[in-house]
Image (cartoon, helix red, strand yellow):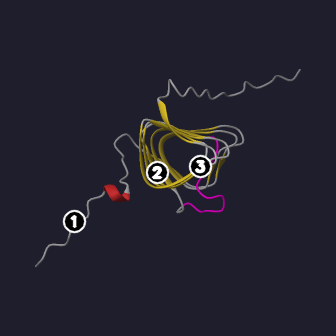
C-alpha cells in the first residue's frame, strides 16, 4: 500500500493580508518606488523598491532591482533576471520568504526564515538575517563628506 504525502498549501487572502497595491499583468513599472501596505505583482517591476507590507510575486510576473520588504514574501514568479546572477537583484525581507513550486529566484535573498516548496528554484544565494540585523538600502545610507583638513 502506497500512502500519499500530505500536500503543502499556501493560502493567499489579499484582504486579510492587507494587499492594497497591484501591478497588473501586462504592466511594466520601473523606478524608485515605495508602496504603503502590501503589493501584488502580476506584471513586471524593476528598480529601487520598498514595500511596507507583504509582497506577492505572482506566476508569470517578475521583479528585479534592490528591494526591501517589511513583511513576508510569497514567490510564485521570477525574482531577478532569468539569466541574471546574484548581483542583478537583491531582496531584504523582514519576515518569511515562501518559494512555491513555480517560484524562481536568481537574485540574492536576505530574510529571517525561508520555506521552499517542492519544485521551487533558488538559484541565487540566501542569507539568514538575525534578530537585530537590518541591511541598509543604498539610498538610505547617509554619505558623510570627508572632513576638510
Please state if 134 lies on the left or on the right of 29 as rendered.
left
- Quadrant (top left, top right, bottom left, bottom right) of the C terminus: bottom left
Q: Is residue 114 visible?
A: no
Please state if 1 lies on the left or on the right of 71 as rendered.
right
Please state if 23 lies on the left or on the right of 26 as rendered.
left
Q: Is residue 32 visible?
A: yes
Relative vertical location of residue 103 with respect to residue 10 in this rendering, above or below: below
SS for callout 3: loop
- Give the residue displayed 67% in from the left and 46% down from the top: 60
The residue segment tinted magenta is: 76-86
- Would you name the residue on which mark 2 appears? 67
- Quadrant (top left, top right, bottom left, bottom right) of the N terminus: top right
Q: Are marks 1 and 3 in contact (CB under 8 Å)?
A: no
Residue 95: image location, x then y, percent = 46, 37
Q: Reading the chain from its start, which is encountered first: label 1 or label 3?
A: 3
* Mark 3: few/some/many CA within 10 Å (<14, 14-19, 20+): few
* Mark 1: few/some/many CA within 10 Å (<14, 14-19, 20+): few
- Would you name the residue on which mark 3 appears? 27
Q: Are marks 2 and 1 in contact (CB under 8 Å)?
A: no
Q: Reading the chain from its start, which is encountered first: label 2 or label 3?
A: 3
Q: Main secondary structure of the magenta part?
A: loop
Is residue 67 or residue 45 the one in the foreground?
45
Residue 100: image location, x then y, percent = 65, 39
What separation in Å lies between label 2 and label 1 (alpha carbons)?
A: 24 Å
- Would you name the residue on which mark 1 appears? 144
Amino acid at each position: 500500500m502506497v500512502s500519499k504525502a500530505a500536500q503543502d498549501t499556501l493560502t493567499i487572502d489579499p484582504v486579510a493580508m492587507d494587499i492594497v497595491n497591484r501591478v497588473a499583468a501586462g504592466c511594466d513599472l520601473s523606478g524608485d518606488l515605495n508602496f504603503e501596505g502590501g503589493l501584488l505583482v502580476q506584471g513586471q517591476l524593476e528598480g529601487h523598491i520598498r514595500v511596507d507590507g507583504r509582497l506577492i510575486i505572482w506566476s508569470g510576473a517578475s521583479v528585479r532591482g534592490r528591494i526591501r520588504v517589511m513583511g513576508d514574501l510569497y514567490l510564485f514568479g521570477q525574482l531577478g533576471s532569468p539569466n541574471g546572477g546574484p548581483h542583478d537583484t537583491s531582496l531584504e525581507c523582514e519576515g518569511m520568504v515562501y518559494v512555491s513550486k513555480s517560484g524562481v529566484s536568481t537574485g540574492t535573498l536576505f530574510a529571517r526564515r525561508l520555506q521552499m516548496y517542492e519544485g521551487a528554484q533558488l538559484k541565487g544565494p540566501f542569507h539568514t538575517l538575525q534578530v537585530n540585523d537590518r541591511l541598509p538600502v543604498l539610498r538610505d545610507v547617509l554619505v558623510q563628506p570627508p572632513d576638510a583638513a
